[in-house]
Amino acid sequence: MNKVTVLGSLNVDTSFRIKSFPQPGETVQVKEKSNAAGGKGANQAVAAAREGAQTAFIGQIGNDGAGKFMLDSLEADHIDGTYVSQNESVGTGTANIMLDEDGQNCILVYGGANQTLTDADVQKAEPIIKDSDFIVAQFETPQAAAITAFKIAKANGVTTVLNPAPAPATAIDPALLKLTDIIVPNELESASITGIKITDEESMIQTAAEFRKMGVPNLIITVGDKGAFYSTQAGHDLIPAYKVKAVDTTAAGDTFIGAFVSQVATDFSNIASAIKFAEHASSLTVQRLGAQPSIPKLEEVLTAAKESAS
């Protein structure tokens, strides 16, 4: 069983199902509204936990009902929330999600307490980081917090995983990339960092070389319904996606990352099979509504893998 710690965001998601996205100045009717636990970090932790990893979380909430809701949701998935701190002056993060009939989404995120996570908060979590196989970070919390966590991880032989999402408004701190063992962007995030547009496998290979120049030795690029490309020191390949009818793509990428770190070896020797497992998990997620409610459990992923192999 992998031990995974996630440093990241905790958001209460409010989803609005609509026919199509509004144009500027247009008012549209909402068909359905729902609330659920979310945030990229929390989603990834839930995916890791549901796929069998021993999972802990580092983050921050406000002193409000939304914060309690998020703590309860972590506990429900047996995620260690010992190092989720509380901000007395800033509210818990929220996200408003518009979902159209084709399963595509637009998301408005209020960072709230996620953005006030400090180096000191992360340093308090050193015991859980040191005891992990992997630590995962994204960009819904400050980069400085991720750097602190990754420094602790590297000093203790813990594998670091960076999901550079959402794409940062400012440049990624080079120090963070040099502390990253594997980076997992989608094709748009990858292009925003390297300047290389993902068009084919050759452009993916060039991207991997560019990330190596930045100090990141291993790469996975998720390319939607085309699958996922990986590059390690041992080689590279494009793993095709499993074809399904998408209902809601929210949390698909987060499910992929959480499921991946629940299965992959710390030396990435089984990276291809771990990616296939993660693709099965995310293919189940997109067939359901919501973020965390759509993330499958281990038994469901194993069943889907067995069915696709038969």
Image: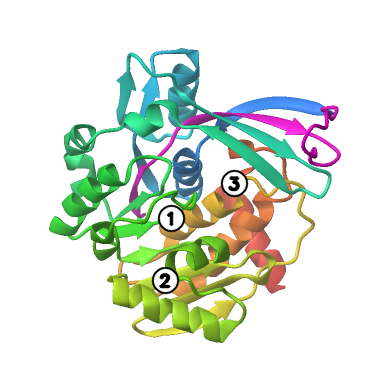
Q: Above or below — where is 90 with respect to 261? A: above
Q: CA distance from mark 3 to mark 1?
A: 15 Å
Q: Amino acid at mark 3?
A: Ala
Q: Which residue is mark 3?
A: 251
Crowding near pointer 2: few (<14 within 10 Å), some, many (20+)? many
Residue 131: tell me if it is visible. Answer: no
For the N terminus, the quadrant is bottom left
Q: Using the rendered view, name the quadrant where residue 62 is placed.
A: top left
Binning the other alpha carbons within 10 Å of mark 3 as few (below 14), some (14 to 19) or many (20 upward) gives many
Nearer to me, 101 or 285? 101
**Which segment is the magenta one?**
1-30
Residue 29 to residue 294: above or below: above
Secondary-structure class at tag 3: loop
Q: Position of residue 269 (x, y in %)?
A: 37, 76
Q: Secondary structure at mark 2?
A: strand
Residue type marked 2: Leu
Q: Nearer the viewer, residue 129 or 67?
A: 67
Residue type, mark 1 in image: Pro
The residue pinned by badge 2 equals 219
